[in-house]
């Protein structure tokens, strides 16, 4: 375990124990990783997207720190919850934008194997993906978590395996199955 990881885990323990100043000490240790998650996601968004990566990071961090009953177990646990929180911020933002447009123009984005931003090809509606992930969560919670960590969090197969406490091949299998299931679900077949 790296020194930064140990330090972050110790600060999360302090946060769990009610030390409100711990949040200020935690941010410098996780900010770069949160920014990487936000940049990873925002590369998929349209150029005129109104939410910027910095705003996404700040909103997600505020939501994370504002959790009154969070029991942070480690830095990896915090980053996994951060991926989920980023997902919720993006979905909330998409819902607000669509509400302003009276339901028009749902934004679509791509769910693909290598998780690299593709060249403007938009295949998956973010709000439809959120709905499908809810269904997948009830059927196969770990597969839904894999999608969340990889797609919204930008984590690699190895990082996802570490966060979930499973082997790499389990994540690879879950990822392949979940993508196929989501593709079928989102295509309406």
Image (cartoon, helix red, strand yellow):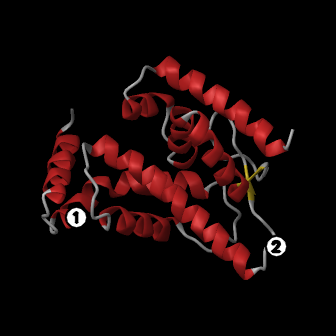
Please state which of residues 172 and 39 is positioned toward the viewer in this rendering: 172
Q: Residues within 10 Å of mark 1 (few under 14, many from 20)?
A: some
The answer to which quarter of the image holds residue 67 is: bottom left
Residue 175 screen position, x and y as percent: 60, 30
Image quadrant of residue 15? Answer: bottom left
Residue at x 27%, y 59% (from the top left corner): 69
Q: Are marks 2 and 1 in contact (CB under 8 Å)?
A: no
Q: Which mark is residue 127?
A: none
Q: Is residue 186 above or below residue 140?
A: below
* Figure disc tally: 2
Q: Looking at the image, is 67 positioned above or below residue 144?
A: below
Measuring from the top left, give residue 186's x and y in whole percent.
78, 45
Front residue of this view, candidates 13 and 31: 13
Secondary structure beneath dot 1 equals: helix
The correct choice, above or below, for 173 with respect to 147 in the image is: above
At x 25%, y 43%, the residue is 74
150 or 46, nearer to the observer: 150
Quadrant for the C terminus in the image:
top right
Whichever of callouts 2 and 1 sits on the residue coming sooner in the sequence is 1
The furthest residue to the front: 138
Give the foreground label among 2 and 1. Answer: 2
SS type, badge 2 = loop
Q: How far from the left and from the top, in percent, is residue 97?
A: 68, 75
Image point (47%, 21%), residue name: 168
| Mark 2 and mark 1: Cα distance apart in space | 39 Å
Task: For label 2, count other residues whose C-alpha is less than 10 Å away and answer few (under 14), some (14-19) or many (20+).
Answer: few
Q: Residue at x 17, y 62 (%)?
A: 22
Tag 1 residue: 23
Left or right: 34 as drawn, with respect to 145 = left
Q: Is residue 8 left or right of residue 55?
A: left
Residue at which label 2 appears: 104
Q: Quadrant of the N terminus?
A: top left
């Amino acid at each position: 375990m790296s020194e930064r990881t140990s330090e972050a885990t110790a600060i999360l323990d302090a946060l769990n124990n009610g030390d409100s100043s711990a949040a200020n000490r935690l941010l410098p240790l996780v900010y770069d990783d949160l920014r990487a998650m936000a940049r990873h996601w925002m590369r998929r968004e349209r150029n005129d997207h109104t939410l910027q990566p910095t705003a996404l990071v700040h909103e997600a961090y505020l939501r994370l720190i504002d959790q009154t009953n969070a029991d942070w177990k480690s830095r990896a646990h915090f980053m996994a919850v951060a991926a989920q929180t980023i997902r919720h911020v993006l979905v909330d933002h998409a819902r607000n934008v669509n509400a302003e447009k009276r339901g028009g123009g749902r934004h679509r984005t791509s769910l693909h194997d290598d998780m690299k931003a593709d060249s403007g090809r938009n295949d998956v509606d973010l709000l439809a993906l959120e709905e499908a992930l809810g269904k997948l969560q009830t059927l196969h919670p770990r597969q839904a978590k894999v999608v969340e960590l990889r797609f919204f969090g930008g984590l690699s197969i190895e990082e996802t395996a570490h966060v979930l406490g499973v082997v790499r091949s389990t994540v690879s299998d879950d990822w392949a199955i979940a993508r196929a299931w989501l593709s079928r679900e989102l295509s309406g077949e």
